[in-house]
Image: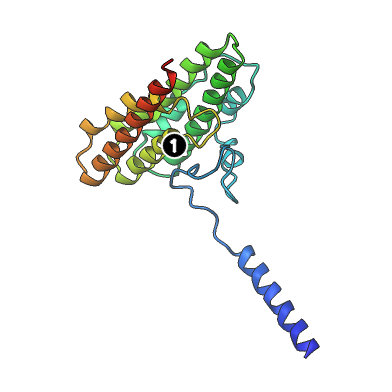
Amino acid sequence: MRFVALALGAALVALFAAACAHSPAPDPMRYRLAHSGTHWDRVGDDPVLQDLQPRYPAFFALILDPERTEEPDLRPLRRDLEARPVDRRNYDALNAVAIAYFEINYRAEASREAAGMGFLGQSFRSAKLLAVPWRAYMEIEDPNLRSAVLAFFEDAASGEKLGSERTAPRLLRVVGSLESREADPARKARIRRLVAELLAQSAAAEASALP
């Protein structure tokens, strides 16, 4: 019986290893940072940042260096995000912008907490990054890509990522403006739900600020 148990155990280990070896890679044609916890470099086994750095090396070299404060060139990401026909490059651009937004937004909030001088500059940089998917939503019609952009805004509004809890209410006008450009009932309802959540967050933030 001992040999049978050992053989069975070895077989199970082999099957598990084979399953892991042949498990499909995460689908890149989606918003990839949802439910990543407090950070934005990877989600479980999906190394999002590592995957995207070779596509946008100059962009990430600037974004990830806390000593550099110049404006990133967003034109390549805009072109990719708004490209037609829609393919992987659209989603890569969306995820690259999302990583950059969370990084710069966190840096801005950290500067605010430390009463640093960089708060306004970093806030403007994060706002310009946020404008990239906002503009793309106005330009694109592909339903899956529009849903992916909404998934990014939902993630940014969730307050899950470091530094994003306080800045979530700032998304209110950005997200609210999408409804007039959306005809699909499901996505329109999704936008309205997100707006309602942001309104509630804004009200709570104002109440907590009262003496």
Q: Do we see residue 131 in this rendering?
A: no
Which residue is pictured at 63% across the width and 64% down the height?
20
151 relative to 178 in the view: left or right? right
Count residues near mark 1 (Cα–Cα under 10 Å), then give few for <14, some for 14-19, many for 20+.
some
Task: Indicate the amino acid at tag 1.
Answer: Ser
Q: Which residue is mark 1?
A: 158
Q: Quadrant of residue 62?
A: top right
117, above or below 139, in the image: above
Q: Do we see residue 83 in this rendering?
A: yes
Instruction: Single out the residue that lies furthest toward the front.
Output: 211
> Where in the figure is residue 61, as x and y percent of width and height?
62, 26
Q: Quadrant of residue 67?
A: top right
Instruction: Single out the residue that lies furthest toward the bottom.
Output: 1
> Where in the figure is residue 155, as x and y percent of width and height?
44, 38
62, above or below 159, in the image: above
> Where in the figure is residue 93, as x and y percent of width and height?
46, 35
Element type at marker 1? helix
- Image quadrant holding the N terminus, namely bottom right
